[in-house]
Image: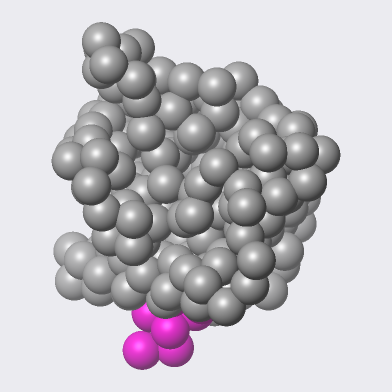
Amino acid sequence: MKKYIAELLGTMVLVLLGCGSAVFAGDIAGTVGGGTGTLGVALAFGLSVVAMAYCIGNISGCHINPAITLGAWLNGKMETKDAFMYMLFQIVGAIIGSLILSLLVSTGGHTGPTMTGANGFGTGETAQAFIAEAVFTFIFVLVVLGATDEKRGAGNLAGLAIGLTLTLIHIVCIPITGTSVNPARSIGPALMEGGEALSQLWLFIVAPFVGAAFSALVWKFISSEK
């Protein structure tokens, strides 16, 4: 249970701080990210992962992302029950983070373009969004599997490597979908926002899982000693 609670807290922090940067920084200049821009939002997500990696990494491994949990499970690094419970608590954590963010928005004078930091894509951009989310999740999960590998991993620097990778991915992908590569991160804000964000949510669940599955297969192949 301690592992599950750690995943809940970690995902809550990721959504609250990451999506919060897109929501409240937008008040400054009237655009998503506002004065901080794409780089600022990207850093908020990346630094949130770094912070949580060194906070709960020794407790749960700090997945805080169902796609990472799927990749770990497919590589035989965790039991089926743990994988399911990790995903469940990650989603609950994301919802709690989005609830807190919604409360902050509703009790203040928010004027930015986004209320929740939900992911989305434009009309006719479904294919582009799917490819982006699948490919960038593939890269992200592959880095996670490599950085945390017992024999070839980055050791104590794994959290930093993973956080910086997520930052880089956000810099490229924010203009396309707002960047998910994390089904839980998308579920929480979409539930709070509803409407179009909720109707597009399927893509931000399916595409990251597809990318994570491929990264698990690729890592299993390239890391095999056979």
Asked whether residue 111 is in view, the answer is yes
- Which residue is pictured at 52% across the width and 60% down the height? 15
Report if residue 119 lies within the magenta region: no
Magenta segment's dominant SS is: helix
| Rendered location of residue 45, percent (x, y) | 64, 49
Q: Residue furthest bottom?
A: 1
Answer left or right for 145 relative to 213: right
* Residue drawn 70% across the image and 31% down it: 38
In which quadrant will I find the C terminus?
A: top left
Residue shown at 55% from the left, 42% from the top: 113
Q: Viewer-proximal residue, 67 or 16?
A: 16
Residue 44: x and y, percent? 71, 50
Position above or below: 158 against 88? above
Q: Position of residue 135 (x, y in %)?
A: 40, 20
Q: Quadrant for the N terminus, please.
A: bottom left
State how the image is colored. one colour
How far across and how far down the image is residue 110, in percent? 62, 60
Q: Residue at x 68, y 39 (%)?
A: 30
Q: Is residue 167 left or right of residue 129?
A: right
* Residue 2 falls inside the magenta stretch: yes
* Magenta residues, start to end: 1-10
**Image position of 34 with respect to 18: above or below:** above
Q: Residue furthest right?
A: 35
* Number of numbered callouts drawn: 0
Give the camera-side residue of 103 and 219: 103
Q: Is residue 164 visible?
A: no
The quarter of the picture where residue 218 lies is top left
